[in-house]
Image (cartoon, coloured by chain):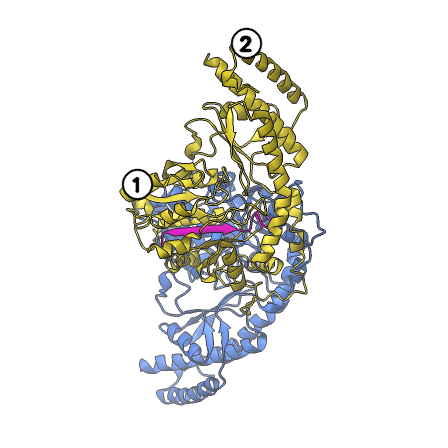
Chain colours: A blue, B yellow
Amino acid sequence: MTAYKDRSKEELLQEKSQLEAQYKEFQGKGLKLDMSRGKPSAAQLDLSMGMMDVLDSFTDLKCEAGIDCRNYGVMDGIPEAKRLLGELIEVPADNIIIYGNSSLNVMFDVVSHAFTHGIMGMTPWHKLDKVKFLCPVPGYDRHFAITEYFGVEMINVPMTPQGPDMDLVEKLVSEDEAIKGIWCVPKYSNPQGYTYSDETVRRFAALKPAAKDFRIFWDNAYNVHHLYDEPQDVILELLSECEKAGNPDMVYKFSSTSKISFPGSGVAAISASKANLDDLRTHLTIQTIGHDKLNQLRHVRYFKDIHGIETQMKKHAEILRPKFEAVLEILDRELGDLEIGTWTKPHGGYFISFEALDGCAKAIVAKAKEAGVVMTGAGATYPYKKDPHDSNIRIAPSFPPIDELVQATELFVLCVKLVSVDKLLENM
Amino acid sequence: MTAYKDRSKEELLQEKSQLEAQYKEFQGKGLKLDMSRGKPSAAQLDLSMGMMDVLDSFTDLKCEAGIDCRNYGVMDGIPEAKRLLGELIEVPADNIIIYGNSSLNVMFDVVSHAFTHGIMGMTPWHKLDKVKFLCPVPGYDRHFAITEYFGVEMINVPMTPQGPDMDLVEKLVSEDEAIKGIWCVPKYSNPQGYTYSDETVRRFAALKPAAKDFRIFWDNAYNVHHLYDEPQDVILELLSECEKAGNPDMVYKFSSTSKISFPGSGVAAISASKANLDDLRTHLTIQTIGHDKLNQLRHVRYFKDIHGIETQMKKHAEILRPKFEAVLEILDRELGDLEIGTWTKPHGGYFISFEALDGCAKAIVAKAKEAGVVMTGAGATYPYKKDPHDSNIRIAPSFPPIDELVQATELFVLCVKLVSVDKLLENM
């Protein structure tokens, strides 16, 4: 196939009329498909149904510390849950606080805490004229929503396959005391599926921020969410790297079992230095008497240890891998030579990131929607929903059954072609 | 028995030496008892063990709206949970948002939201020079801890058996725009077990606060927590009273199933006007993707409706009632005529409130502790832990088995006598 940019006007017009006919056909099908959010499919949820049986009315509901998990108490998590999540997050159990069902909620609360009370006794952010966060882009919309909600000025930092542009990160954080944080999804990043290189992690650990209360918000959401037995991405553990670099307090690591067991009924955790955790505990001790220990117990009794989690993740991968491969096969087949888009081929995580021609993303998403396929809103992967090039589209292959996913992707590539043809014709 | 105040110095000295001998005997027993917190006992927790069986790996985990409760979504609660908690809170399901496992956490978040973003678009409290709360005293230490944590100035308002001194409440809220809230446990209050009268509730509903963002924080924690089939306290429903009085937005009602099912693994909720709930939803939609819907489903499938909850509460009462009666019997028997203390005789809730002679509470609690019985810290029932009369002690009969409770109470009355004798001798 000849690249669109090398075709004549006449050829493009002919292509357009064919594409429009195909699009009309799709519209006639009355599709109602959703490729918008990173939700596990029903088949994936079925993998964890055994978890509903591990606690029953005959079960001893004491944790290993001898505490009755049915009652009040144990503010920061039962020991075995700290150990399990510690294994997942790759830090000692002592560096863990277990929270409720949502790591997003933990991130929100940590930001809120920084605004109302300050981090480790430093000035509460609400007393500052300006608070800024660095936002590797494209990134996760719900991170950006938190900082936007608190009036934080968000600064785009371009992503590369090795992680954020660290020259820029180093320069900005060392120069500007108003920069208090950076949002990171370091492994199988949302949406590109990139994993930060060892050098990137070490440069993070060695940052010299102007602000003493600068923190790296390290949302390691996809640490064990591989698609393949081989290759699997590996990432350096940041908390210990920060310790080695003399910056032990510079990072909050977030994690949860949401996409391991049941989204919304999992267990979330934060890991950080003892000083940071003590600071968060002063907040937590006012905020709650304790999180749901029975659900912590349920998770530990079901998974037992990291090997139990890894086995589960292989089963998830068996369901997810064909979906990713189906999407990638269609993208390759239909767009491979056309030079109207590029896309990532991640080894794990929940997303494929698509880069359309500049100025085309919104139109593509709108066109897909008109024919019954909901994509993540164009722009969602950027702070303030403003993609400066209007080019990035997040593809979420996990939720639909594979036959629907194939249909949705076929429509998607058709929309990419249509909008791209229009764009090229416009400029002729 | 002659009242202590009517005894001669010699008689008091003789009494003192007898009491000291008894105290020494207690010390020899090596007791380790806890009457400090309002925790259900193991026997009460056993009542809900059936809840561990209602969801298993063969259960259909869709809620009645057809949504898979295992997956993400449904930010403010599944319909049947709203209905159940609505029945519990005595408001329509539409006036409910379901949260996570802790109503204390909801209260904290609502206060935090008011500080960072303001209520219903009004000025965020962190921008105000001064924020004040009214605190009916004695009251619940964890309420006071939240407002203290946010730097709120807390103003004591005396409790009466009909509720807070409403003359004072009306006067203060109408005069001072800095007063933004009042903490209330309106039924079987913590610690006195008082229930607000109809007149009190109506006067609350008719308040004319100077601050438009004044809210009544109505923590109806013990609404169905009766000790007896008869008498049971009844309270007017405040949200509808506020509507009638033209103040629909003036109240947040909080509730949870913590002391109905499992503390820490229950379901919490807020009820308020639609305008207030919409305001909270704008916050919630940034904070979380949703709370634990499987636990919501577990509660609804187990209790079914308010009748299921009421049946459960009768079983709780059968366990709690003998404990309250045992404590009251000892207080009556040992202190009945001595005029060195008064105490409440509640029809429900989790506490008995004891008023010692002025200046004696701390010494009594310390003396009990020395002999191995932990009471709620003296002062805890007041803001800043400062009981101006050093007289109030909260007794929590729920947790210990009854034989331990009897021992602990026998020691408690002994400590009351000892400290009171000392006090009277001091003043002779």
Main structural element of the magenta stretch: helix, strand or loop?
loop
Subunit that carries the residue with mark 2: B
Asked if B94 appears above or below A27 in the picture, the reply is above
Dot 1: within a 10 Å radius of its alpha carbon, few (fewer than 14), some, or many (20 or more) residues?
Answer: few
Q: Amino acid at mark 2?
A: Glu
Magenta highlight range? B247-265
Left or right position of A13 against B423: left
Quarter-wise, where is residue B406 in the image?
top right
> Percent position (x, y) of residue A102?
52, 54
Look at the picture and state if B341 lies above or below B268. above
Residue A261 in sight here? no
The residue identified by callout 2 is B10
Seen from the viewer's position, the closer of residues A423 and B237 is: B237
Say which mark, if any, is on residue A328.
Answer: none
Q: Read off the chain for label 1.
A: B
- Point out which mark residue B171 bears: 1
